[in-house]
Image (cartoon, helix red, strand yellow):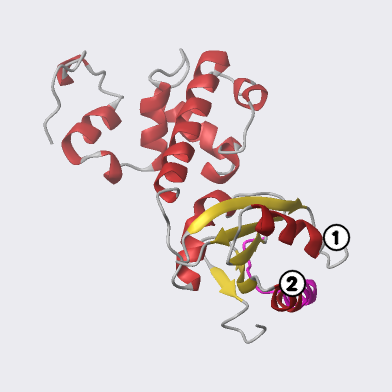
Amino acid sequence: MIIHDLPLKLRDFPENEKPRERLLQYGAENLANNELLAILLRTGTKKESVMDLSNRLLHSFEGLRLLKEASVEELSGISGIGLVKAVQILAAMELGSRIHKFANEEKYVVRSPEDGANFVMEDMRFLTQEHFVCLYLNTKNEVIHKRTIFIGSLNSSIVHPREVFKEAFKRSAASFICIHNHPSGDPTPSREDIEVTRRLFECGNLIGIELLDHLVIGDKKFVSLKEKGYL
């Protein structure tokens, strides 16, 4: 990897800020979370190095999962972070999120349950509440729209088919996939999950807009209710 016009040379880096040197030598993908965060923070405090500050910040939020959801107030409330560092962290998180969404929006085709899960996994596996999302597809199984229908515990009386199919008509969808997350990280379907799936499947058959699958998202894993035989 060749980097041109660097504002700093390696000899300018303090000895306790090895992550920047390691990034230049081995690439960003080979650094640990605390090292990448240390590079983002740039400096520590009078009492601790930037690596110590990075480790303490990650420990305060129990890792990246909760850090991703942190507010400016929560971040700047950590000793040694302050408003500027808090804003830098949030900006970096948002850039990563937007890059992921941009890649997903380029005519994404769903050919399997894995395709559907991959489309939403990074957005949904960290959510602390249940989100019920629909992916609307055209006749080529390309995603034409993604819509969050409901936030909260899944219930067949709350997730009404009217809201699901209203969006399908609006987008002229040929079919759709339902997806919701389990904040516990365990994607095992509940009784309510199965009831909602069967209700939407029956409505889809009557209307002519097929429910292709209902995916339950956990932490880096998912369950397809179609593969489980509920569709």
Q: Position of residue 213 (x, y in %)?
A: 60, 73
Contact flag, marks 1 and 2 (Cβ < 8 Å)? no
In-image side of 110 versus 229 (left or right): left
**Residue 48 image point, x, y percent:** 45, 21
Q: Where is residue 45 shown, x and y percent of the image? A: 46, 15
Let me know if residue 186 is in the magenta part. yes
Quadrant in the picture for residue 156? bottom right
Q: Is residue 196 above or below residue 65?
A: below
Q: Is residue 31 left or right of residue 189?
A: left
The answer for how far apart the CA atoms under marks 1 and 2 are is 12 Å
Magenta stretch holds residue 176: no
* Furthest residue in direction right, as rendered: 157
Q: How many marks?
A: 2
Disc 1 packing (10 Å; few <14; some 14–19; many ≥20) = few
The quarter of the picture where the N terminus appears is: top left
Residue type highlighted by circle 1: Ile
Q: Nearer the viewer, residue 202 or 230?
A: 202
The residue at the point 69 percent across, 54 percent down is: 167
- Residue marked by disc 2: 200
Q: Which residues are magenta?
A: 184-200
Quarter of the C terminus within the rendering:
bottom right
Nearer the observer, 30 or 127: 127
Mark number, residue 158: 1
At a point 70% along the width and 78% down the height, the residue shown is 205
- Find numbered disc 1 in the image and state the secondary structure of the residue it sits on: loop
* Residue 99, x across and y down, in percent: 41, 39
Q: Quadrant of residue 51?
A: top left
Circle 2 packing at 10 Å, graded few (<14), some (14-19), many (20+), is many
